[in-house]
Amino acid sequence: MGLKESFGNTLKTFARIFPGISDYQDKESLRGQDKVVREHLADLLNKQVKSLDELKIRLIEAKKIELLGKLELTTKKISKLSDMIKQSSYGYSPIFASDAVDQKKLKKIYEYDISLAGEIRKLDQDINSILETANLSLDTTVFDELEHRLSRLENLIVGRKKYA
């Protein structure tokens, strides 16, 4: 072990001796992990927006502009949901809260994040099937189904606030 690693380990040990410092470090670590998860979920949604933007171009090139309005509403909703996830409350209490880490609350937040990821995967599958549609023979019912999925995703995002 090098000097840097040894010094770092000593500092970590030293910091945990003082009351309250370890709780603060634990909370900050949990908050940081939650932020990474939320940013990843938002990035997945932003990739879907980019895919739908490419679909817009294909529809214009194919002179099938009747679906552009619905497609634009769908992409705006996905962008809004991405922003909601990024800006949602951190995964635990405020930085200087004196409470110990509530494992049940934390577990519930992680379960929510897993359910969000699952719903985003389903949305991704739906969008991929739209993108693979031969000759862009789409109708408005495709976007109605996407709207239903987006509403469920939005409800999950809003429901997460109960646990954060």
Image: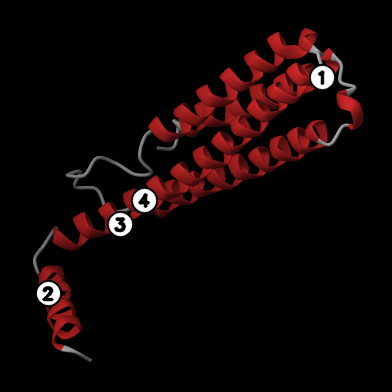
- Answer above or below: position of 64 versus 35: above
Distance between mark 1 and mark 4 Cα atoms: 55 Å
Mark before the other along the chain sequence, 2 or 3: 2
Mark before the other along the chain sequence, 4 or 3: 3
Residue assigned mark 4 = 102
Residue assigned mark 1 = 62
Q: Residue at x 58, y 47 (%)?
A: 114
Residue type highlighted by circle 2: Leu
Q: Residue at x 74, y 33 (%)?
A: 127
Q: Secondary structure at mark 4?
A: loop
Are the two marked residues, 1 and 4, in contact with CB atoms closer than 8 angstroms?
no
Residue type highlighted by circle 3: Ser
Residue assigned mark 3 = 29
- Answer above or below: position of 6 versus 111: below
Residue type highlighted by circle 1: Ala
Distance between mark 3 and mark 1 Cα atoms: 50 Å
**Residue 95 on image: x %, y %:** 21, 44
Residue assigned mark 2 = 11
Report crowding for label 2: few under 14, some 14 to 19, many 20 or more residues within 10 A (C-alpha).
Answer: few
Q: Left or right: where does residue 123 sit relative to residue 84? A: right
Q: Left or right: where does residue 139 sit relative to residue 103? A: right
